[in-house]
Image (cartoon, helix red, strand yellow):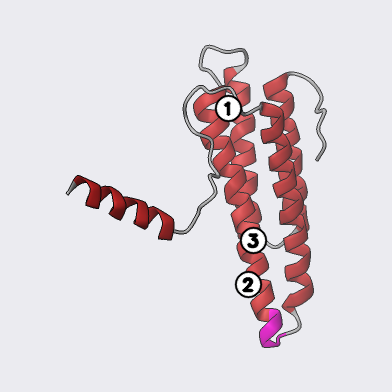
Amino acid sequence: MKRALTLATLFALLLSPVRPLLAHCQVPCGIYTDQLRFEQMLEDTKTIAKAIDQVKELAGQGDAQSVNQASRWVATKEGHASNIQKIMAEYFLTQRIKADGDDYVGKLKAAHAVMVAAMKTKQQADPATAAKLREAILDFYRAYEGKEPQLEG
């Protein structure tokens, strides 16, 4: 019986779709770096900006294919904004910003500004929202690191 259960479990695992691990585990592994998180958020912001441009370009065309593509760009924009919010919440707010650390309130305010700016990119199709999100990320970097950004994005 035990072997049948093991074979059934193995079979189920082989047939299940492979899903990439997207979230940071919440153990103190030390593998992930702050720098990479900031660069990821800036890359997400570039994608959001491109999505906004594409939606604007496709919006007036009105044919079925353009509507389809525009809706896909909106979904992409929202997914990347959600990713930024997730990084802020699950990485920085729960793991990295410590209540007994330096300038706790300043870091929280800057983190909140990033999350709100990401939300606004979901609500609007204005390129200015992506620019404000980028600036909020850079401001958070300054509050968090205490220096000017040295980032690829």
Q: Residue at x 76, y 70 (%)?
A: 56
Q: What amino acid is at disc 3?
A: Thr
Q: Is residue 153 magenta?
A: no
Q: Earlier in the sequence, mark 1 or mark 3?
A: 3
Q: Eyeballing the image, is 153 above or below 104?
A: below
Q: What amino acid is at disc 1?
A: Leu
Q: Eyeballing the image, is 3 above or below 76?
A: above
User: Which residue does the numbered mark 3 point to in the structure image?
Assistant: 76
Q: Which residues are magenta?
A: 62-66
Looking at the picture, how far across and down is residue 64, in whole percent?
A: 66, 86
Q: What amino acid is at disc 2?
A: Ser
- Chief SS of the magenta region: helix
In contact (CB < 8 Å): disc 1 and disc 2: no
Query: Tag 2's secondary structure?
Result: helix
Query: Tag 1's secondary structure?
Result: helix
Q: Earlier in the sequence, mark 1 or mark 2?
A: 2
Crowdedness of circle 2 by 10 Å Cα count: few (<14), some, many (20+)? Answer: some
Q: Residue at x 17, y 49 (%)?
A: 1
User: Which residue does the numbered mark 1 point to in the structure image?
Assistant: 108
Query: Tag 3's secondary structure?
Result: helix
Quarter location, residue 150: top right
Q: Residue at x 58, y 27 (%)?
A: 108
Looking at the picture, how far across and down is residue 121, in whole percent?
A: 66, 54
Q: Position of 146 compared to 19: left or right? A: right
Q: Eyeballing the image, is 108 above or below 119?
A: above
Numbered tag placed on residue 71 in the rendering:
2
**Of labels 1 and 3, the one closer to you:** 3
Crowdedness of circle 1 by 10 Å Cα count: few (<14), some, many (20+)? Answer: some
